[in-house]
Amino acid sequence: MRHPQPGSSSADVSAGRQANRSARELVGREHELATLEQLLETVRNGGSGTILVRGEPGVGKSALLERLIGSASGFRIVRAVGVEREVDLPYAGLQQLFGSTSDTIDVLPPPQRRALQVAFGLSSGDAPDRYLVGLAVLNVLSEAASVQPLLCVVDDAQWLDTETTQALAFVARRLGADTVALMIASREHVDDFDGLPAMHLGGLGIADARALLDSVVVGRLDEAVRERFLAETRGNPLALLELPHALTPAEAATGILGGSSSLSERIEDSFRRRLEPLPVDTRRLLVLASAEPLGDPLLLLRAAVQLGLRVEAADAAEEAGLLEIRERCSFRHPLVRSAVYRAATQLERRQAHGALAEATDPQLDPDRRAWHRAQATAAPDEDVAAELERTAVRARARGGLAATAAFLERAAALTAEPARRSERALSAAQVKYEAGLLDDALTLLTTAEIGPLDDGQRSWVLLLRARIAFTERHTSEARPLLVEAGRSAEATDVNLARLAYLEAFHAAMHDGRLAPEGMAEVSAAVLACPPPQGEPRPRDLLLDGLATRTLQGYAAGAPLLKQALVAFRRETDLPAEDTHWVFLATRVASDLWDDDAHAELLARELERARQTGALAALPTLLDTRGTSHVIGGEMEEAASVLDEARAVREATGIKGHGDGGLFLAAMRGREAEAVTVITHAAERAAAHRDGLGLAAADYCTAMLYNGLGRYQEAMAAAREAGEHPYEIGTSTRAVAELVEAATRSGADDVAGRALERLTQISGASGTPWALGVEARSRALLSEGTVAEDLYCAAIETLRGTRLRPELARTRLLYGEWLRREGRRADAREQLRTAYESFTEMGILGFADRAQRELAATGATARKRTDDTRADLTAQEVQIARLALGGLTNPQIGAQLFLSPRTVEWHLRHIYPKLGIGSRRELHRVAQRL
């Protein structure tokens, strides 16, 4: 074995040994090389960038990476290579990258540092949020790049573990002023990398392919045969370089490549032929190296000793151009590794994995040792299965769901006892579901059902099948399965039964408009279920209240639901399995017109998510927080948190859309913008059979057209939104929109029925919000002093809340009534106050309506200006506000998923736009933010 000279880095050695080969292999890649050089130049000038290179095996991706490394003078280089047999080990790829940057972990903010240490198995703790790990990686790379520009190179990304690809995708989307170049090569599509700047690497042009072929062909090749060979290889550089050495006489005579069905398999065949003349020990050493993903020469040496192989066996492998052993073991090409492994017999593979297991330190790397043991085992073995199960526990603690599921699945396969095998298969199915591997989860559920299951396990099977159906948006299938799971669990685990019913209610609520009988079915099952074991939890009170509301009406369910909100507000340290239901609790708070509970629960959960790094929950929380700001008339704050929600989704790839943007657009009242947003939301909801989404679109349409004074359209939308009482959180508030639209449309009978329902709601709710809106709505159907007293009472009630839009709308309606009564001076006072309030809040539709009414009294209004923020972008506004609030650059970066250096870069651009020179002067321009 040869070793590098002292002081040389792995990147330096790699670049040097590849230089001559890359020069020959990079024929015809001038455009691609220019693109890569531009990337490096951008980073040298203080920028950053990412390029994803896609292409078939052998097309030259690895050669491009090596050329990029060779051109990166002045850069610090970190790299990782995906290995097929490492794909299930969590964060294995990141650990490769961090080998030379681990010293920077200590400078991270505590939540990020803990997340990364747990992910790497350096400390224990709760499984880290995968996106918090991504933010930690971003900051580690940014910190490393603060000393000198950083080139991060990742090859064979299709074989990286899921946790690594998610972290890299996060980093790629959030690089800013970090002087980092990220280069990723993959032969297959990787979902996490969708949307990244991509370069597709195809075959060489015919002239370049011919030149490359001629550089390796010894002797004369018939022209017709040459052309046929060029056509068969499709310009693939590795095929052009390797296959001529392995041509059979028939292939050399005809140019027709026989045998394998794909070009990559044909290239593998050529590498396999190189194995045949090698000594037996050399072939066994190559199999050992192909099964060892780390490229650790000392580990390979220890395993070779286990198999009785001589170290000299490596010389023949190097001379054959298949393997190089220096400070790392590296194959000539990834296809060599796969060719060697696939050429080996099952026995040879098991022997190699067994030797690697024995050579792996059980204290330093227990997970890889367990995995090698599992691969070395052909027959059921409880000892190996139990070790895999322990490994799964460690993987789960690090947040590696895919790895956990893989370990449990293999453990089940190695389990002989039927009941134990079913138990492990069921556990693996649960984790597969959590990891989003739904087809695999269904397969494992089928395996679990083959063996004996007790009643509790059968209930879990039903519950998992239902959850999978709901995740796949088959809510009509999920609901009856969840009800069946609940009934099955009642006799053995009431708490599990009630959890199933709560999930069934959630599914039925989404599907309610299209299948209204589902809500009644679930509610009846809930009320027939035994009470919870022990003290009722907040979610138990929530479930009972929802069931009562559905079957017995709003007024009957309100007391129980109020108790549930009190319990959720009191329980500041909810268990993880209950925090999910806080979202439903906030919807109930809206349904009860309880703005205080709505705002408090949201603020608390948002703070919890930030502190714990639960970034996966942030988009929904931020969207809902945006709605809360809209309710309070805080349009700019709503826009800011909704921008943050979009930033999280962009950074993490989390899909989905919340209602916050829908409510903001409707309340602002810019018709073209609002109609576009509402139409898209309604189309998404219809496509997903989401009744709640349809209800939100109808409600926002009613609010929009009431603001624009188009009452017939508002009435139609409000009737649709309000006639489905099980659409909790929307239908009750739509009733108030219906009263206003119907009275303005002359449909007093419709308005009267709606007011009757609103009165029942406000009586059961009893909050200032509900009572104020009910008084305002009753005034619309009243006359004389009764109407005036009601308007004044509504104003007085709402004045003591944060609900500024409701107060302004009440003043608008009162002013309109006063004008019709001929009291122009009194009307002007109310209408001007309403107009100025709407204008200040940015509620433009209602402001225009107030302005028209004011003009009808003979008065004029100050011209509205929409924006005074010196052309700051939405992200710049967020950063400036957070800096004004006293947050440091690392704190701002943690909240907006940027590195501190990128935050500082933005601030340097913000100050000139605001006409100030530093952070200390932000208070002078606070009103412009």
Image (cartoon, grey):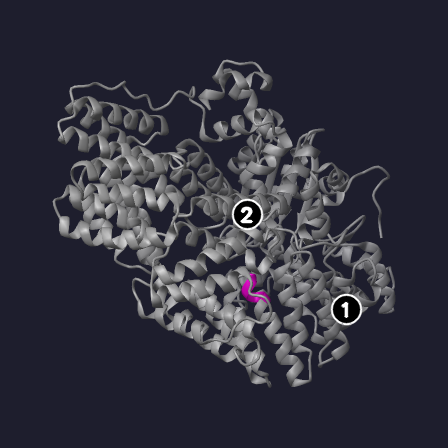
Give the residue drawn at x 29%, y 28%. Answer: 834
Mark 1 element type: helix
- Whole-angstrom CA distance, mark 2 to mark 1, is 50 Å
**18 and 608: which one is in front?**
608
Residue 838, position as x, y percentages in the image:
32, 29
Is residue 434 a member of the stretch shown in magenta? yes
Label count reads 2
Q: Earlier in the sequence, mark 2 or mark 1?
A: 1
Is residue 596 a member of the stretch shown in magenta? no
Give the residue drawn at x 51%, y 44%. Answer: 600
Residue 605, position as x, y percentages in the image:
55, 47
The span shown in magenta is: 431-435
Give the residue drawn at x 59%, y 46%. Answer: 608
Label 1 near label 2: C-beta < 8 Å?
no
Displayed quadrant of residue 138: top right
How crowded pointer 2 is (Cα within 10 Å; few <14, some 14-19, many 20+) is rated as some
Amino acid type for the residue under numbered disc 1 = Ala
In the picture, measured across the screen, residue 43 lies left or right of residue 798, that is right
Residue at numbered disc 1? 352
How crowded pointer 1 is (Cα within 10 Å; few <14, some 14-19, many 20+) is rated as many
Amino acid type for the residue under numbered disc 2 = Glu
**525 and 857: which one is in front?**
857
Against 472, residue 778 (above or below) is above
Residue at numbered disc 2? 605
Residue 287, position as x, y percentages in the image:
74, 65
